[in-house]
Amino acid sequence: MGVRHDHDGQELGDLEPGTRQRAQLRARVVDIASTALCVVLALWAVWSIVGVVRGTAEWAYSAVACVLLAAALTARTVGLRRGVVRSGR
């Protein structure tokens, strides 16, 4: 692979438009964000279920947490299957 040059003959940086790293950046950011969202929702669901068992929280909080976690996991899975998040492209 040769070094690509822009209009002025200068080297392109790692995240300049047209580089492979720039193309992969969006996929990585989406992957990291969706993973973080699922982790936070899973922690919230576990925390609220433990609270319901201990009697310190309402069941509605755990129900909302579980529904949001299911929706986030479904969206992540569907996105991966449809190829919305394409690592390496």
Image (cartoon, rainbow, N blue to C red):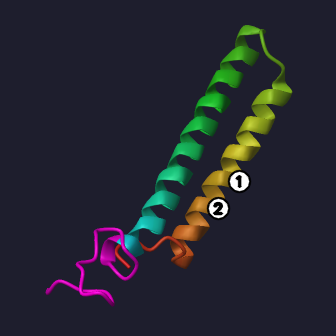
Report the magenta residues as a range. Answer: 1-21
Residue holding disc 2: 75
**Place of residue 4 in the rendered image (x, y in percent of width and height, measured from the top left):** 23, 86
| Mark drawn on residue 21 | none
Residue holding disc 1: 71
Q: Is residue 83 magenta?
A: no
User: Quick check: 43 left or right of 21?
Assistant: right
Q: Badge 2: few (under 14), some or many (20 or more) residues near its Cα, within 10 Å? A: few
User: Quick check: 40 left or right of 58?
Assistant: left
Q: Is residue 4 magenta?
A: yes
- Decide: marks 1, 2 in contact (CB < 8 A)? yes
Which of the 4 image quarters holds residue 88? bottom left
Quadrant containing the C terminus in the rendered view: bottom left
Q: Is residue 86 above or below residue 71?
A: below
Residue drawn at x 65%, y 30% as measured from the top left: 44
Q: Is residue 5 above or below residue 46?
A: below
User: Quick check: 49 left or right of 82?
Assistant: right
Q: Nearer the viewer, residue 66 or 44?
A: 44
